[in-house]
Image (cartoon, rainbow, N blue to C red):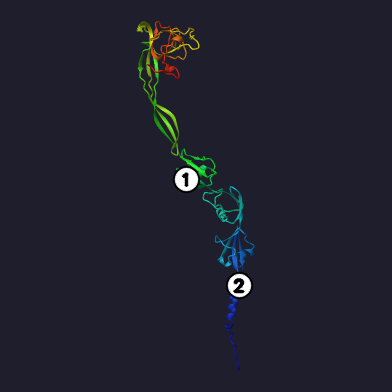
Amino acid sequence: MNVYRRRPFHFIPFLPVLLVLLGLLAACRESKQQLFILEGETLYTVTTEAATLGQALDQAGLALGPDDRLLFRGQTIAADAPVSACARPCLLQIRRAVPLTVQTPSKVITLFTSANSIAEALEEAGFALSPADRFSLPLETPIVNGLSVIWTPARELTVQVDGLQLRIRSAAQTVGEALAEAGLPLIGLDRSEPAENQPLPENGMIRIIRVVETITTTPKILPYEKRMEFSAELELDQTQLLQSGEPGLALARVRTRLEDGVAVAEVVEGETMVRPPQDQITLYGTRVVMKTAVVDGITITYWRALPFYATSYHPVTSDITASGKRVRIGLAGIDPRYIPYGTQMYVPGYGYAEAADTGAISGRWIDLAYPTEAYVPWHRWVTVYFLWPPPASFPYYIPPPCSTLTGYCPPPP
């Protein structure tokens, strides 16, 4: 009997072929990659065999515009980066560019940007920003479609203060705001040129003037007055000191204004009386007494004798006196306010004289009359005797020429 055995199947010769097939299958599976793409609030899932991220987006209908931005893990990634650069799981974000309007002092600029904030957009656009610039919105404001911002660039300014020149930058509207921003506010009475409420000057020059006001008290001497009181107990023309004069004292309150250390104004705001002045009071006698005297060898009776400044005159154009009498020896010009016409007098060295004329004569001044052919010049002080009886009324006091005649004051005897 023949017995047949089945020969066994050997797998080993086919193993290399199987390994090749499995490798091809794995390579096919690895050539495809799954991407997760976030645009706005929409999440897309894309399985792609594209070589670059940009190609993958194009195939998915999510092509990037020239100003759009592709982000991976919050960082910008280039569109031509290989898909393999996006580690699994691959989550990408598309930020589409939107218009941003920037208004400057000279023009309006529209930017298309996919930046995250205003600051980032302006820096990417090449704007030279300064910390002192002013914006209508915070620079951290996120970019949204239709956003508009006003940009006021800071200007360079020179501030003169306390003997120094300081350079600052400011986009303020007024001088006061610029100084405050720079830590140089006007304090107290300080002022600036231009004034703090004025716009920034075109030439960029600002001056701070330090203003200080001081108040001091200054002693002031107050002069006393001299006054006369008539007394019937004293003989006519006799005087007696009743009260001595004493100056007073006041304290003047003076406000002094200094600008940059230089006094520019001084004002007396008021006075405080410390001691009032005390008037000097002199008693002047009014009691008329009849007296006699021998003058030029002649005995005369008189009621008043006073020193007068004596001059003499003769007629030049007219020989008629103010009283209507013709000029002759024995007439005299006087001040009729104090000596009535017709008053009889005796002048030593001249003789009897009657008050009959006037002219540039004031107070104790007598002008003795002479005919032209007998003229004798007089220019000296002399005692004039007023002969008895006295007139019914007369002034008790006759002032010296110096007190009543302007521009002429003969020296006293």
Give the x, y percent position of residue 264.
46, 35
Foreground of the two, 391 or 46: 391
Residue most toward the front?
373
Above-or-below relation of 240 to 69: above
Above-or-below relation of 214 to 125: above
Give the x, y percent position of residue 90.
57, 64
Q: Residue drawn 58% across and 80% down? A: 16
User: To which quarter of the image does residue 395 belong?
Assistant: top left
Q: Check disc 2: other Cα within 10 Å, few if <14, some if 14-19, many if 20+.
A: few
Foreground of the two, 369 or 248: 369
Q: Residue drawn 58% across and 78% down? A: 19
- The residue that mark 1 highlights is 165
Tag 1: residue type?
Gln
Q: Quadrant of the N terminus?
A: bottom right
Q: Quadrant of the C terminus?
A: top left
Q: Is residue 132 left or right of residue 251?
A: right
- Look at the numbered disc 1 and give the secondary structure of its residue: strand
The tally of labels here is 2
- Look at the numbered disc 2 and give the secondary structure of its residue: helix
Give the x, y percent position of residue 252.
41, 29
Q: Is residue 327 left or right of residue 116?
A: left
Say if residue 256 shows up in the picture: yes
User: To which quarter of the image does residue 287 belong?
Assistant: top left
Give the x, y percent position of residue 289.
37, 7
Give residue 314's mark.
Answer: none
Q: Residue drawn 61% across and 72% down? A: 28
- The residue that mark 2 highlights is 28
Q: Kindly report the distance in space between the C-alpha atoms of the residues bearing marks 1 and 2.
A: 76 Å
Tag 2: residue type?
Cys
Above-or-below relation of 365 to 178: above
